[in-house]
Image (cartoon, rainbow, N blue to C red):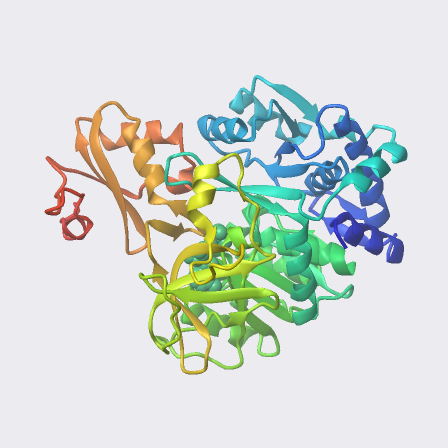
Amino acid sequence: MKNVLEYLERSGALYPDKISFADTDKQITYSELIARARSIGTALTYSVGRGKPVPVFMGKSVDTICVFFGAVYAGCFYTLLDTKQPKMRLLDILRTLEADFIVTSHTYDDDLAAFGYGGTVLYAEDLMEAQENSTLLGMIRKLSLDIDPLYCNFTSGSTGTPKGVLVGHRSVIDFIDVFTELFNITDRDVIGNQAPFDFDVSVKDIYSAIAVGATVHIIPTAYFSIPTQLLDFLCDRHVTTLIWAVSAMCIISQLHGFDYRTPTEIKKVMFSGEVMPIRHLTEWQNALPETTFVNLYGPTEITCNCTYYVIDRKYERGESLPSGIPFPNEKVFLLDENNQLVTETGKTGEICVSGTALALGYYNAPEQTAKAFVQNPLNNKYIELIYRTGDLAYINEEGLFCFASRKDFQIKHMGHRIELGEIDQALDSIDEIERAVCTFENNKIIAYYVGSIDKKEIVRRLGERIPKYMIPNRFVQMDSLPLTKNGKIDRKALAAVKKR
Ligand code: AMP
């Protein structure tokens, strides 16, 4: 198999009339999805060449899925643009993609007006009306390679510009084949999609489903602030499988959602993105005692996840939940600060990964790519690229990887991966700020700054550049920032500063 469309077409042949994707307004069968995607694919070939990006300015919906697969039929890769992002950030992404058009739908007319985009706008509603040209689509497929890019997900970048992680067909097929097999995801499963489509957790929902002919129910983002609605949705749609971010699971347990209703048909819960707090895991385990829970670990750059741990017991608070063992066909190992392999139990090293799972790099960013995707320092005999995750871990007595912490200033805040450097850059762009730096303390982003500007105005200006979830929770105005003897900002001293 070299193209994910083979998954879609296989399921389309086996289950033509089965619902593939459903949201709160629409549902679509496998055969309808293929037909619509082929129409969109044909229409896109008139505007965009093979191998090029298709920026999709839409939320998560059935129509968005049609556009994604339309882009793939056109031999392109897709990037979801979060419609709620500030204009400047969206333009940064489009600049990186060197794209002069976007695909959207009339559902997002208001967001599009707020964005004020000046380039070409293609509407999904129009693209779907195109007459499919199977000769053209056949030619495109013939030319396709398994190393062709499939999607590009943008993640926060420390230079101030988001980085586009480009992932190819081969990596997704390699991962999804083992993922569906290991966790027994079949055509009988009903997947409840939580993750936004610009977050690679959703890749597991979309591609697991089309690989086995399962159904995905797309849960509206708004339901994650109303647990009763969320639990009704899970029960009423007979959801069996959750592949969610840790932060989303915690919403249900924190708000004691299970006191209202328990979705007893859920048989598999796979979570990732952050350390799962044991208190929350226990609450889920108590509510769903027959359910399998799996801790998945990995960054977007290695295609979803590289290790997994099937949880076989209850954990005590204070115990650390292992990240587990590598997925088949992924090499996961630890390097110490001298680039030596860590083999000793309990010793910490940086998690490094090699294998087909590695992304194709950061799109249009060769320098950043070269920094993170490097030759394996343990191999000087042939080319073996590894991805340095920046995560620190150790191996426990049972031989399982255990996540420890980060090496740098990347954080997870409200489920979002953020480089504090991107916020620092946004603060720097404000003329009245002389110097600023952010830290992450007790789950809060704190901005320390020197300058004559009040907090309200800073928030307003930051809102023009960075998404809401990146705006610091607190601002501390200072006369000067403490420095270490090497002249760097002393973050330890900042943590000790009294915050009013
Ligand atoms: P993302 O690329 O958004 O998936 O974020 C990847 C980062 O999230 C990793 O590099 C880790 O720092 C963190 N992460 C992902 N999964 C886990 C997990 N199961 N436990 C702890 N941290 C995780």
Residue 193 appears at what percent x and percent y? 63, 54
The residue furthest top is 118
Q: Quadrant of residue 204?
A: bottom right
Residue 278 appears at what percent x and percent y? 42, 71
Residue 171 appears at what percent x and percent y? 63, 54
Side of 54 relative to 46 (left or right):
left
Residue at the image point whose x is 88% and y is 52% from the top:
16
Residue at the image point whose x is 73% and y is 41% from the top:
69
For the C terminus, the image quarter is top left
Q: Quadrant of residue 190?
A: bottom right
User: 119 or 126, which lies in front?
Assistant: 119
Side of 140 relative to 435 (left or right):
right
| Image mark count | 0
Is residue 131 among what the camera can see?
yes
Side of 194 relative to 479 (left or right):
right
Q: Quadrant of residue 213?
A: bottom right
For the N terminus, the image quarter is bottom right
Is residue 183 among what the camera can see?
no
Residue 479 appears at what percent x and percent y? 10, 35
Residue at the image point whose x is 62% and y is 35% from the top:
58
Q: Is residue 351 above or below residue 427?
A: below
Residue at the image point whose x is 73% and y is 49% from the top:
22
User: 23 or 143, which lies in front?
Assistant: 143
Side of 459 relative to 418 (left or right):
left
